Image (tube, helix red, strand yellow):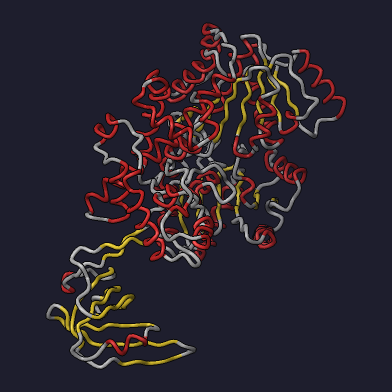
Amino acid sequence: MNLSERPVDDIYGVGPTQAELLHQHQLHTVEDVLLYFPFRYEDYSIRDIREAVDGEAVTVVGTVQTQPLVKFFGKKKSKMTVKLLSGGQLIALLFFNQAFHKAKLQIGATVTANGKWNRARAELTVTKLTVGDTAEKSARVPVYPAKGELTSAKFKRIIDTALQSFGDDVEEFLPEEMLHAYKLPVRKHALQELHLFTSASQLKHARRRFVYEEFLLFQLKMQLFKHHERQASVGVATTIDNEAIEGFMATLPFSLTKAQERVLNEIFTDLKAPYRMNRLLQGDVGSGKTIIAAIALLSVVLSGKQGAMMVPTEILAEQHWQSLTALLDATGVTVGLLTSSLKAAAKRDMLHALKEGYIDIIVGTHALIQEQVEFKDLGLVITDEQHRFGVRQRRVLRDKGAVTDVLYMTATPIPRTLAISVFGEMDVSTIDELPKGRKPIETYWVKPDMMERVLSLISKELNAGRQAYVVCPLIEESEQLDVQNAIDVHQQLHTYFQDQFNVGLMHGRLDAKEKEAVMKQFTAGEVDLLVSTTVVEVGVNVPNATLMVIYDAERFGLSQLHQLRGRVGRGEHQSYCILLGDPKSDTGKERLQIMTETEDGFALSERDLELRGPGDFFGDKQSGLPEFRLGDMVHDYRALEVARKDATELVASAAFWEDDLYGPLREKLRREDAFFSTKLD
């Protein structure tokens, strides 16, 4: 029987009670238990205290020199100290709430103590004490994630027993050539090393083996999913009218960047292929995604089909409609707008025109996915700011065409390490180059006590006929606090500027229509200064806005700060971003400093990922992030990319599907997921 099929009570000593406790840790099989890895190792090897580094955990052996001194305070709290001679140096042992050790600490007794070393005070805060010289010269004890009745020590006993009974039954599923190419240990030996720790170098190779294994299995699942989606959703190859497209591009008042050209070729390759496109286009604020969308839509219309673009808000829909109408005006392509605020008669006419094919491209909000919306022949769907829509909403629009190609767009730069993991089932295109001549946004970090200078800058910009944003932090724990924060700041600025400027207010408690009304006033120039929460983060285009002031900037992640900064710098005038903050942590200070040093959204997203980790990068509400036992998408990104390359090549090769060499790997995938058990046959 395979270890993935053996229940945990096959392990000697594991009865019904312990089995239930293991189940609570999501450990149901012997393989689950063997793959429950330590998260660190306690070092109990004897050290010379003179070589110990301040703050590290060390183990020392010595003789007790003084009677222990115990002081009691509070309820059942105590502090005990004693002098120890270790390696010719007299040090103090400090115990908190461990007065029960007093009897062991007789003058002249030899003891082994493990704890945290304070070099300045020559003091060891003891966590573990044993009588005698009990430490081994190279003892490393694994520490397992534990909660409740199953302690780390109990986990160690269960896992040691499982290794003794089933260690030799651990199967290898990676081909020999892979192990040899990457100098990876076999699975059985790597597993034992991770639990038993014989040497630091062996442990490093064992971890490397399992990191690669985890990433490869995950990427194989992604590539297999993509492979079968392609086979299942046979598309229609779009004929690209290269001459007409080149003629259109020649009329543009600018040339595409090399990054835009590369991305456009990737999209054309997909459109010309006989399967459905499923591509994510990501590009920094101002990188020129709209023109790529326009060319892609035009190419589909020229082939005789219709295109649709869905965006999250009405004001963004109107902006895209205006942009596409202006860009495609000379081509004869008709661009329609469909939003929920469209009056009944106009909506009825629009739906009729769409169904009969009189509208070539439709831009709209969620209104596009309503049941009564029908197309004559929908060929391409573009979803802008795709993360603002649910999977079901995106699919409803896609399915309004028989074989619709899909392009998702986002202005939130996603680090490559996350993009190939979270969006592994998509192809990812990246515009990583900004158009020439774009003025950089000058960014400054100032402390709150410099508010007078900030107000002076706001006055200067508004007096010059420009507009400005002031953003207050979103406090998720209490929406009321968030609103109150924005209201307070709005009231202060309204009082400060009195009748000189029109100060608007927008926050999350306003309904959709109220938000739209405020944004339309700001876009039209009727509001000079807009105080807002982060609802302005995405998609608003006001070229006349040249100043962004962010209160309590340390509360935001780098990517969010960058998105907020991207609301300005969209016109011909010099723009500024002021980060108001007084961070107490080093991370907060580093975050604001980084913002003043670079405008590269992808560089910032990588740093954000390093500072916050993948779990916090998208926020708690984002799902779909894979969980790995040992792999870290940030620090092991090279292994992640190698695994993706290998998985892509394997799935595309005949050998993976037919050769006995890959039989164990195919069998592993079959056992792990019912979806693949049918697809691999």
For the point 49% across and 36% down, the residue is 284
For the point 59% across and 38% down, the residue is 387
Up/down of 600 relative to 20, above or below = above
Closest to the observer: 15 or 230?
15
Image position of 306 (left or right of 450): right
Please say whether residue 492 is visible from this viewpoint. no
Up/down of 260 relative to 392, above or below = above
For the point 40% across and 49% down, the residue is 35
Please say whether residue 56 is visible from this viewpoint. yes
Closest to the observer: 110 or 474?
110
The quadrant holding residue 97 is bottom left
Up/down of 136 relative to 398, above or below = below
Number of dots carrying numbers:
0
Which residue, as the protein is rendered here, is positioned at the far right? 345
Image position of 39 (left or right of 23): left
Image position of 585 (left or right of 639): right
The quadrant holding residue 334 is top right
Where, quadrant-wise, is the N terminus in this rendering? top left
For the point 37% across and 35% down, the residue is 641
Residue 81 x, y percent position in the rendering: 30, 87
Residue 392 x, y percent position in the rendering: 67, 34
Image position of 67 (left or right of 355): left
Residue 469 x, y percent position in the rendering: 60, 49
Closest to the observer: 117 or 135?
135
Which residue, as the protein is rendered here, is positioned at the far left? 88
Residue 178 x, y percent position in the rendering: 29, 31
